[in-house]
Amino acid sequence: MGEKKVLVVEDEEYIATLIKEILRRTGTEAVVTSRAEEALSVLENQEHPDLAIVDVSLPDMNGLELYRTIRERFPSLNSRFLFMSGYTPEDDLIQLVQNSENRFIQKPFHLLDLQKTIENML
């Protein structure tokens, strides 16, 4: 089995860098984008990741909208999302996480909590 690959969609550079470092330490390749449209382009042109870590508040589209777009275009990623936000999650996101294998982590998060969540999802 090859190296695991994770798509990280996060517009805060320091958080994206932190996540990328956590993934590197676990031998997981990270593809990092700061905008939803970039993430969609990556999915169109590269092998699909094993997991997508997505900030709920992105500058060009919210994370839930991005999830819905990806779910339509790339159904194999339907249950491979880890959402994160510094805000209280909205009801539709809570329902999605409760009724699927997708997960949510609240910012600020402990690094070990994030690492364990990622490992469990991979």
Image (cartoon, helix red, strand yellow):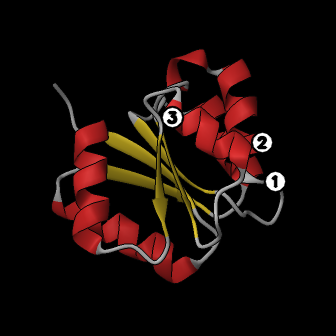
Q: Height in image: 109 above or below 33?
A: below
Numbered circle sitting on residue 75? none
Q: Are marks 2 and 1 in contact (CB under 8 Å)?
A: yes
Marked residue nearer the N-terminal end (1 or 3): 1
Q: Height in image: 89 above or below 99?
A: below
Residue type pointed to by label 2: Glu
Question: Cα distance, mark 1 to mark 3?
Answer: 22 Å
Residue hosting label 2:
65
The residue depicted at 51 percent of the width and 18 percent of the height is 76
Where is residue 43? Give x, y as percent.
60, 34
Residue hosting label 3:
98
Closer to the observer: label 2 or label 3? 3
What quarter of the picture does the N terminus occupy?
top left
Q: Are marks 2 and 3 in contact (CB under 8 Å)?
A: no
Which residue occupies the foreground of this view, 63 or 4?
A: 63
Where is residue 41? Give x, y as percent.
69, 41
Marked residue nearer the N-terminal end (2 or 3): 2
Question: Cα distance, mark 2 to mark 1?
Answer: 6 Å
Residue hosting label 1:
61
Closer to the observer: label 1 or label 3? 3
